[in-house]
Amino acid sequence: MEKIWLKSYPSGVPAEVDLSAYTSLVELFEESLSQYAQREAFVCLGKSMTYGQLDRLSRQMAAWLQARNLQPGARVALMMPNILQYPVAMMAVLRAGYVVVNVNPLYTDHELEHQLSDSGAEVIVVLENFAATLARIIGRTAVKQVIVASMGDLMGVKGPFINAAVRYLKKRVPAWQLKKYVRFNQMLASGARLAFKFTRPSADQIAFLQYTGGTTGLAKGAVLLHRNILANVLQSEAWLAPAHRNRPEIKQLVTVVALPLYHVYALTVCALLSIRTGGLGILIPNPRDIAGLIKTLKPYPFNTFPAVNTLYKALLNHPGFGQLNFSKLLVAHGGGMAVEEAVARHWFDLTRAPIVEGYGLSETSPCVTCNSVVATTYSGTIGVPIPSTEVSIRDEDGVEVAPGQEGEICIRGPQLMAGYWNRPEETAKAMTEDGFFKSGDIGVMNEDGFIKIVDRKKDMMIVSGFNVYPTEIEEVLAQHPGIFEAAAIGVPNEHSGEVVKIFVVKKDPALIEAEVMAFCKERLTGYKRPKFIEFRAELPKTNVGKILRRVLREQL
């Protein structure tokens, strides 16, 4: 396969990346923790943490975990927003020789139970704001140890005041009861009295189980090895290098970490790449609070800003946008959903830094393609394959098509997952005989190697950058005794790109919209819940009885 995209590479970007620098993420961590010990590593709500402190705290937590007599490779779930406890816990789990299972803290009982049960997680770190959800389902999982974090844990003297405000003024912590748990700071204090045993994970050991919405309904865990994530960190670093070279006076890269760290895009491009370069990550616990986001960012002349289209748009439309300092912004990364041309142009006009659109998947750690970080014009494409990555556009028979022709985007590279956790049949279905991952996205590659997505995974929706699969929603609706059948589709939305609309055929004639909405609220995370319901006498189907979502979209 000819790599026609290499001619479109910015100057200085290599075709292949040397992946021999580290055998594991632990090795990368220890290098940065030692080399940059005095530097600030992360800051949250005005409180910063140096690399030296991150080293000490993650060792303490790793020692505590090792004292639980867990087997090597045991899974530890992290259920937190972007707070200082996240990088401490993520690093501790890996340094202790275990596997991180990232969990969306907004999950419903059903979603959380599935992920904890499927992964076999034995330990969970949960922010107390979400402990009530865990308490309701923990008895049906393998979880033996619970660490409960509070917003103020690592905030020093202002910690108790932050906790009081969150619990009693803002009332953000629903009542919860767990039989057995330890507080985050208690756990750290205990760990400080224990000996930490250095581990040396191999490149082929699992680092993360990254759950991704499955086309078959329930989420599947993408098995990401140490070498997969390492490769993507080094690939991303090589791709960003041209922008950095233009500003040699910037000694420490400051990254806005507004995307949730439980999402693989933020995990790799924000947290891990920042740690690799000795950067500073500004953690944003609630990116929906645009006024709060602007207030947090005002003191910092930040350098990189990964986000989704909806966040860029919300910022551009906020009256406080002009208060931000863009003088040292090198690049804004757009991912998760398509970046609108109007948004990209407006952003560049005001900041003089491009929104560089890329493409990736949980299964690819995630980055696959990207536009040039020194581009100044909107390409309308997802860019070209990044170093050490091959993309092949193939027809339904698996044969590569010529440039300009449509086909499925298939991917091969060192960042590609080892497979789906405990799902060999699903893994086999997703792979070609020659080792390419079938993304399910339909794209076109032009003569210069730039790829444009022309159709998404059949029927999948993208709500605020998150993949939403109709099957999962329909399976929930099928459990309602008053529903005969239902279908879910995405409809355009100015703020989130798309929202969910459902079509329902009643079994119970007395069924009303509010009842269906309440049922969904109990079982689906906010972005998966339907915003519109249409009752119908019947749904369009194929001659074998399969519901035609395409027809429902066409009828809008």
Image: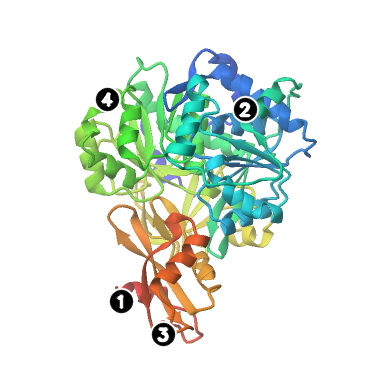
Distance from disc 1 to disc 4, alpha carbons, whole Å, reads: 46 Å
Disc number placed over residue 185 in the picture, else none: 2
Per the model, the C-alpha gap separating discs 2 and 3 is 56 Å
**Element marked by disc 1:** loop
Q: Position of residue 329 (x, y in %)?
A: 31, 27
Q: Residue furthest top?
A: 38
- Residue at image point 23% right, 31% down: 352
> What secondary structure is marked by label 2?
helix
The residue singled out by tag 3 in the image is 538
Left or right of 105 in this view: 195:
right
Quarter occupied by residue 139: bottom right
Q: CA distance from mark 3 to mark 1?
A: 14 Å
- The amino acid type found where label 2 is placed reads Asn
Which amino acid type is shown beneath numbered disc 3?
Glu
Question: Residue 473 at what x, y percent from top left?
Answer: 49, 66
In terms of sequence position, does the residue under pointer 2 or pointer 3 come before the other?
A: 2
* Residue on which disc 4 sits: 325
Depth check, mark 4 against mark 2: the one in front is 2
**Label 4: few (<14), some (14–19) or many (≥20) C-alpha neighbours in 10 Å:** some
Query: Is residue 18 visible to us here?
Result: no
- Per the image, label 4 sits on a secondary structure element best described as loop
Is residue 396 shown left or right of residue 244? right
Disc 2: CA contacts within 10 A as few (<14), some (14-19) or many (>=20)? some
The answer to which image quadrant residue 333 occupies is top left
Pick whichever of labels 4 and 3 is earlier in the sequence.
4
Circle 3 SS class: loop
